[in-house]
Image: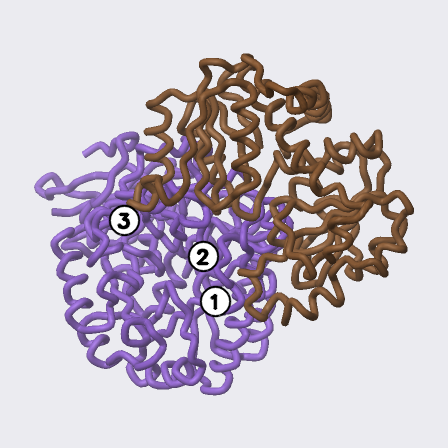
């Protein structure tokens, strides 16, 4: 998200808007990217993002190839650079990469000529999630500028939070982050956000609530003692949400831990736009593929 | 044969100011230091003349902290290639850290290193032996036997001594054998798989941070142990403002502590990691500008005694990978001198102090020869052109590895000739002594 300008972001959101309609057709396919090949290279488990990219590519008639960690040469000890060189030798138009190491897409991009889309790298960025979040907010609220957004959860280890913060700040929203101090990154204010640790206070007068998934695997008793305690003090519930604006929307990048960071009734309730995010995700990714392949080769998105 | 170095200006940190003196060398030793015009060889004398006009001559530079990777990782560096890199950088002596494979925790490894150094036959290589067997912080190594075999210090460098009791006993026991103890300061739990300095940049890049406190806690511990035992400790690669503060305070209280830093800690800061450049990854990590400033102040005020490179060669296999998977460390022997001379031009330290931190001070901490230019002493010296400007190029390194964050940067100041025991071990193409 760091590399995108405000006008880039607007262009992507506008393009997604115009492509949205394709997904509601009876025959959900246009020939725009026929003959183009797209590699979905997922070196870390993912259901939503991977499916979303694949769906997006197929609706634009591109040929897709999906590689995951278990069936790639990575398990045989091949380095990322060697894998990149091999993929490059097959001359794909776009490589979409999800990787557990921050910066991995940058490394890949140095070794391939095709466009590279970052589908999430370590705890660094998840730009397509941020774009679909911006798209969702714009559709629901009609604007982004001036909105008050709060992000609650493990900010320090969240690539979604990092990308959302950059995107929201660029588009003129006010961003507050909230959660236990163990999950707030050092020098968080340098990201241009306000830190209000207590969700009950942070939620006040907010237009948008973004909940982050509590990664169960991170819970080793050091960042927080138990899921039970987390849900009591930092989880979103009916009581807490009362201090937010009446027309607040609740977002979540998924997958949800029901009863941990958000109660089931809120996730399914009227404020929730969680499933809209998923639908919008396909449109955003269609827009990106279209713009990147239609544009000059070698553009990267991060 | 006699070697006559004429026309140069001597910078001997023990004597302070620059002075024009000719050096006459015979049988590897400095025979005379004479004012220009006083040495008049007769025709029947076999004299090699080295014209050092416009250059300075310093005691041979000494790097008390290098990793030469031999035995075990010869694909990264060998004692021969490391020695070549050292000579090219102006160094006549180095101390090799023990984290080889196997670790230098026994006489046989120490002797092997010395044997390889003899074969390389370029510079003086001093082995540093491990404090604990396998550097596992469990059992002390045989300090006496290692000293007799040729070790000049002990350190578990690459790893901290995690057991405070063991560190205390190491300081006590080492004193009996007059072996300096060098500490790698890192609290493993706090550094918690970190890969760069914890701060605004790690937050921005989503990389796991290593807080300054991870180093400072151990610096404070070592100082307290030095105070407890009354025996000296040397702090390796100081990188933070807090460490400098603790060391300054300890010195003021008369606690026997010495310290070194590396050129990258005063030349770069954590912003070098932006773009995920693995050549900006080392332990301790590049810190914040305020830390670099504190390091400079520490150098200028004598809190930090030594500039050492922590020369840590790694091949592409370890470096051309994802940032979090990359090895820690950079090479430094061929960039240390110009980076230190930049401090002199900046006015942080004067030339003589800079040379002291690169020669006399490490020599006295390790009790090894060199560090001064005196009649009767070994002719270990470096001829430096302070004004030579060049760009660091990847392919120009003599080191087997080229993991340097300074590639592409402009440097000023270069070793033109390096002499060990009267023998020239490095001479730049740009330096043409008439003979």
Q: Are marks 1 and 2 on the same chain?
A: yes
Q: Are marks 2 and 3 on the same chain?
A: yes
Q: Which residue is mark 2?
A: B283
Q: Which residue is mark 3?
A: B23
**Relative to residue B72, is residue A209 drawn left or right?**
right
Q: Residue furthest left?
A: B44
Residue B30 visible in the shown view: no
Disc 1 secondary structure class: loop
Q: Colour of chain A?
A: brown
* Figure check: A288 above or below B337: above
* Figure check: B105 above or below A261: below
Q: CA distance from mark 1 to mark 3?
A: 45 Å
Q: How many residues crowd mark 1 within 10 Å: few (<14), some (14–19), many (20+)?
A: many
Q: CA distance from mark 1 to mark 2?
A: 9 Å
Q: Residue furthest front?
A: A26
Q: CA distance from mark 2 to mark 3?
A: 41 Å
Please tell me which residue is depicted at 35% across the width and 22% down the height of the picture: A90
Q: Which residue is mark 1?
A: B186
Circles 1, 2 touching at the beta carbon (< 8 Å): yes
* Closer-to-camera residue (B6/B431): B431
Residue B423 visible in the shown view: yes
* Closer-to-camera residue (B238/A88): A88
* Figure check: B110 above or below B47: below
* Closer-to-camera residue (A190/B377): A190
């Amino acid at each position: 998200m760091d590399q995108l300008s405000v006008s880039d972001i607007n262009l992507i959101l506008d393009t997604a808007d115009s492509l949205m309609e394709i997904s509601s057709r009876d025959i959900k396919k246009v020939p725009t990217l026929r003959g183009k090949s797209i590699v979905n290279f997922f070196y870390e488990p993912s259901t939503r993002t991977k499916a979303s990219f694949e769906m997006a590519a197929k609706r634009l008639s591109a040929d897709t190839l999906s590689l995951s960690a278990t069936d790639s040469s990575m398990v045989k000890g091949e380095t990322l650079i060697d894998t990149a060189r091999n993929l490059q030798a097959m001359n794909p138009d776009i490589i979409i990469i999800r990787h557990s190491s921050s910066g991995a897409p940058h490394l890949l991009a140095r070794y391939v000529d095709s466009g590279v889309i970052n589908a999430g790298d370590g705890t660094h960025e998840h730009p397509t999630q941020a774009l679909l979040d911006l798209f969702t907010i714009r559709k629901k609220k009609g604007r982004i500028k001036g909105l008050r957004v709060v992000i609650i959860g493990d900010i320090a280890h969240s690539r979604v939070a990092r990308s959302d913060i950059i995107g929201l700040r660029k588009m003129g929203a006010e961003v507050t982050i909230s959660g236990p101090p163990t999950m707030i990154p050092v020098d968080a204010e340098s990201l241009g956000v306000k830190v209000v640790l207590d969700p009950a206070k942070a939620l006040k007068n907010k237009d948008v609530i973004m909940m982050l998934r509590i990664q169960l695997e991170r819970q080793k008793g050091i960042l927080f003692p138990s899921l039970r305690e987390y849900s009591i003090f930092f989880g979103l519930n009916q009581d807490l949400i009362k201090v937010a604006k009446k027309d607040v929307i609740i977002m979540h990048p998924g997958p949800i831990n029901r009863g941990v960071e958000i109660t089931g009734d809120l996730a399914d309730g009227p404020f929730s736009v969680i499933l809209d995010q998923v639908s919008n995700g396909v449109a955003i990714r269609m827009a990106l593929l279209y713009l990147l392949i239609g544009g000059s080769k070698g553009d990267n998105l991060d | 044969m006699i070697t006559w170095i004429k026309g140069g200006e001597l910078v001997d940190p023990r004597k302070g100011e620059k002075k024009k003196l000719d050096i006459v060398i015979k049988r590897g030793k400095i025979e005379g230091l004479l004012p220009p015009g006083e040495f008049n060889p007769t025709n029947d004398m076999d004299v090699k003349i080295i014209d050092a006009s416009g250059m300075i001559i310093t005691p041979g530079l000494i790097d008390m902290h290098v990793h030469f990777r031999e035995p075990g990782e010869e694909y990264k560096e060998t004692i021969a290639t490391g020695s070549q890199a050292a000579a090219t950088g102006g160094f006549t002596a180095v101390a090799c850290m023990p984290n080889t494979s196997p670790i230098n925790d026994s006489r046989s490894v120490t002797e092997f290193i010395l044997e390889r150094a003899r074969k390389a036959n370029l510079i003086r290589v001093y082995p540093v032996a491990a404090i604990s067997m396998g550097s596992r912080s469990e059992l002390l190594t045989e300090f006496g036997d290692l000293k007799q075999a040729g070790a000049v210090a002990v350190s578990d460098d690459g790893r901290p001594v995690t057991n405070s009791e063991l560190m205390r006993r190491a300081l006590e026991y080492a004193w009996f054998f007059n072996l300096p103890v060098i500490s790698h300061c890192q609290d493993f739990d706090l550094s918690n798989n970190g890969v760069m300095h914890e701060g605004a940049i790690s937050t921005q890049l989503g990389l796991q941070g290593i807080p300054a406190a991870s180093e400072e806690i151990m610096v404070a511990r070592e100082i307290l142990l030095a105070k407890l035992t009354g025996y000296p400790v040397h702090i390796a690669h100081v990188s933070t403002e807090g460490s400098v503060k603790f060391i300054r305070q300890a010195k003021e209280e008369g606690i026997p502590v010495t310290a070194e830093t590396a050129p990258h800690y005063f030349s770069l800061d954590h912003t070098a990691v932006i773009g995920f450049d693995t050549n900006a990854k080392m332990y301790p990590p590049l810190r914040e500008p305020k830390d670099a400033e504190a390091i400079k102040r520490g150098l200028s005020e004598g809190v930090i005694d030594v500039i050492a490179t922590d020369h840590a060669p790694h091949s592409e296999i370890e470096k051309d990978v994802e940032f979090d998977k990359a090895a820690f460390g950079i090479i430094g022997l061929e960039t240390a001198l110009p980076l230190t001379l930049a401090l002199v031009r900046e006015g942080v330290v004067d030339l003589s102090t800079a040379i002291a931190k690169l020669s006399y001070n490490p020599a006295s901490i390790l009790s090894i020869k060199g560090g001064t230019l005196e009649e009767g002493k070994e002719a270990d010296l470096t001829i430096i052109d302070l004004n030579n400007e060049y760009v660091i190029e990847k392919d120009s390194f003599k080191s087997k590895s080229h993991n340097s964050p300074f590639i592409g940067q402009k440097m000023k100041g270069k070793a033109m000739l390096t002499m060990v025991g009267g023998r020239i071990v490095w001479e730049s193409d740009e330096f043409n002594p008439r003979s």
